[in-house]
C-alpha cells in the first residue's frame, strides 16, 4: 500500500463512512471555561481542524460527571449547559466534511479534588482513606456515560469514543492490580470488563443504529495485562459492539517485552485478531506521511494523529500535497505554535509536554 491509500474512504458499521483514513486523536487542550463549557478558544481550534482534511475528529476528553474531572479547564459533557458549545463544535466539524466524536471520560481514582473531582477508586487499597465506589455508584457512572452519549447525539455529533485508556475509570476496572472488587464488576476478566461492556451496550441501546461508537484502549502501566486486553478485544470484535478500536500506544512500533507475545509489536497482537467489520487504528508518534502509510501495511484501517496535528492543523492536507511530508522537529518555539493559531492557553498546556515547546521560548 502507499500513502495514497490513506485517502481511500472507510466505511464504519454504523452511520456515514470516513472520507479518508485520518482520525484526529483526542487532545485535551485545557482551554475550556472552568465549568467545562467550550470556550471561544475551543471553537477556534475546532474551526481550524475542521478545515484540515480529517476523516473523523475526536474532541478532547469530556467529563461525563462534574466529579469526573482530571484537568483544569477540561471540556465537559455532563450537563445540558454544555450543549450550545458542543452544538457549535459539531456544526463546524460537519461543515468541514468530517465525522465527529466526543471522547467520553471519567478520571476514576485519578479525579482531582482540587478541581471538584471526586476520586472513584475500584478498590479500597488504591487511595489511602478513600473507599472503593459501591456497586450503585458504578451503575450511576455507567448511566452518566450513556447520558453523555445521548447529549453528544443531541448536539449533532456522529458518535462518541469511550475513553478506556490510561488508568482512567474503565481502564482502572480492567486492571487486576487496581480492581479487587467482590461484586459483579470485579474478579474474573469477564467481570472486570463488565463496566466497559455495559457502557458500550448501553450507549448503543440509547443512541440507536446510526450512532458511531469508538473505544480507546491503552496497554501499558496500571497493571493492565496484554493477554487479558486481547481477550476482551476479541470478544468486542466478535460481537461487533463498536465501530472502531483506537489503540492508544505511545509509540506505534513498540515491542511487547514479556509474556505470551514477547518480541511482537503490540499493534500486531490486535491487528491479528479477527475483527469482522470493526475498524482498527493506532496512535503513537505518527509524525510523517511515510509512517502513516506504513501503519496501513501493518494492518491498521486508519491512523490517529495527535502531536503532529498540533504542530500542523491540516496534517492530512499536507500529506495529500506531499507524500514525503514530515513534521517539524521538536521542540518548536512557542511563536511557531502561536503563528499556527494555537491559543496561549493551549501553548501553556504544551509547555507541560516534555520536548514539545523549546524551553524558555516566549
Ligand atoms: C496535549 C495532549 C493532550 C492529550 N489529550 C488526550 C485526551 O484528552 N484523551 C486521550 O485519550 N489522549 C490524549 N492524549 C494522547 C493522544 O491522543 C495520543 O494518544 C498520544 O499523544 C500519542 O500520539 P502522538 O505520538 O501522535 O502524540 C493527549 C496527548 C497530548 C500531546
Image (spheres, helix red, strand yellow):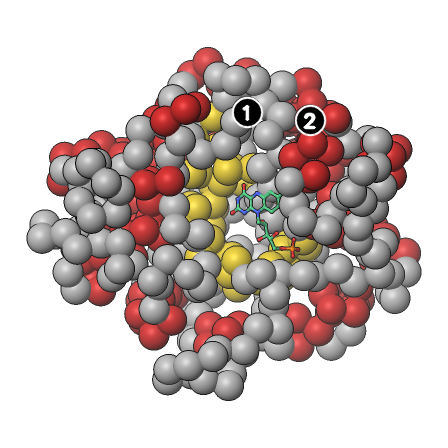
Q: Nearer the viewer, residue 133 or 242?
A: 133
Q: Quadrant of residue 314?
A: top right
Residue 218 visible to an observer of this rendering: yes
Q: Nearer the viewer, residue 166 or 190?
A: 166
Please, is residue 84 above or below residue 245 in the view? Answer: above
Q: Quadrant of residue 106?
A: top left
Instruction: Tell me the element at label 1.
Output: loop
Residue 151 visible to an observer of this rendering: no
Q: Residues within 10 Å of mark 1 (few under 14, many from 20)?
A: many
Please, is residue 79 above or below residue 110 in the view? Answer: above
Q: Quadrant of residue 141?
A: top left
Q: Distance of mark 2 from mark 1, alpha carbons?
A: 10 Å
**Residue at the (37%, 34%) spot, across then down:** 111
**Residue at the (33%, 40%) spot, across then down:** 108
Residue identifier under label 2: 345
Count of picture labels = 2
* Image-based side of 141 in relation to 215, left or right: left
Residue identifier under label 1: 73
* Image-based side of 198 in relation to 288, left or right: left
Q: Nearer the viewer, residue 26 or 220?
A: 220
Q: Position of residue 58 (x, y in %)?
A: 58, 42
Q: Residues within 10 Å of mark 2 (few under 14, many from 20)?
A: some
Q: Position of residue 156 (x, y in %)?
A: 53, 29
**Residue at the (62%, 73%) spot, across then down:** 253
User: In the picture, which quadrant includes the C terminus?
Assistant: top right
Please, is residue 85 above or below residue 277 in the view? Answer: above
Q: Position of residue 16 (x, y in %)?
A: 57, 47
Query: Of the residues under marks 2 and 1, which one precedes in the sequence?
Result: 1
Amino acid at each position: 500500500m502507499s500513502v495514497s491509500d490513506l485517502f481511500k474512504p472507510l466505511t464504519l458499521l454504523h452511520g456515514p463512512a470516513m472520507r479518508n483514513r485520518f482520525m484526529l486523536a483526542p487532545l485535551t487542550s485545557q482551554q475550556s471555561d472552568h465549568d467545562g463549557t467550550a470556550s471561544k478558544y475551543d471553537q477556534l481550534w475546532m474551526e481550524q481542524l475542521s478545515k484540515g482534511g480529517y476523516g473523523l475528529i475526536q474532541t478532547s476528553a469530556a467529563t461525563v460527571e462534574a466529579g469526573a474531572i482530571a484537568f483544569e479547564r477540561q471540556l465537559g459533557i455532563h450537563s445540558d449547559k454544555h450543549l450550545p458549545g458542543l452544538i457549535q463544535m459539531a456544526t463546524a466539524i460537519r461543515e468541514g466534511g468530517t465525522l465527529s466524536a466526543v471522547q467520553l471520560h471519567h478520571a476514576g481514582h485519578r479525579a482531582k479534588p482540587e478541581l471538584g473531582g471526586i476520586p472513584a477508586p475500584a478498590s479500597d487499597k488504591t487511595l489511602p482513606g478513600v473507599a472503593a465506589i459501591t456497586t450503585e455508584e458504578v451503575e450511576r457512572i455507567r448511566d452518566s456515560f450513556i447520558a453523555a452519549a445521548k447529549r453528544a447525539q443531541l448536539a449533532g455529533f456522529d458518535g462518541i469514543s469511550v475513553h478506556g485508556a490510561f488508568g482512567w475509570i474503565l481502564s482502572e476496572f480492567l486492571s487486576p492490580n487496581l480492581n479487587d472488587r467482590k461484586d459483579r464488576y470485579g474478579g474474573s476478566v469477564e467481570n472486570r470488563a463488565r463496566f466497559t461492556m455495559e457502557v458500550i451496550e448501553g450507549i448503543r441501546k440509547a443512541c440507536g443504529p446510526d450512532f458511531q461508537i469508538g473505544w480507546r484502549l491503552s496497554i501499558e502501566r496500571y497493571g493492565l495485562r496484554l493477554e487479558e486486553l486481547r481477550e476482551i478485544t476479541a470478544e468486542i470484535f466478535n460481537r461487533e459492539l463498536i465501530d472502531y478500536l483506537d489503540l492508544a500506544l505511545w509509540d506505534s512500533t513498540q515491542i511487547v517485552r514479556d509474556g505470551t507475545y514477547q518480541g511482537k509489536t503490540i499493534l500486531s497482537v490486535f491487528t491479528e485478531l479477527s475483527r469482522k467489520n470493526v475498524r482498527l487504528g493506532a496512535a503513537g508518534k505518527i509524525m510523517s506521511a511515510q509512517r502513516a502509510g506504513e501503519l496501513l501495511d501493518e494492518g491498521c484501517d486508519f491512523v490517529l494523529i495527535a502531536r503532529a496535528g498540533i504542530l500542523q492543523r491540516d496534517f492530512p492536507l499536507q500529506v495529500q500535497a506531499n507524500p514525503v511530508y514530515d513534521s517539524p522537529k521538536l521542540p518548536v518555539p512557542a511563536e511557531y505554535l502561536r503563528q499556527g493559531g494555537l491559543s496561549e492557553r493551549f501553548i501553556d498546556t504544551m509547555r507541560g509536554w516534555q520536548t514539545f515547546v523549546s524551553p524558555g521560548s516566549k
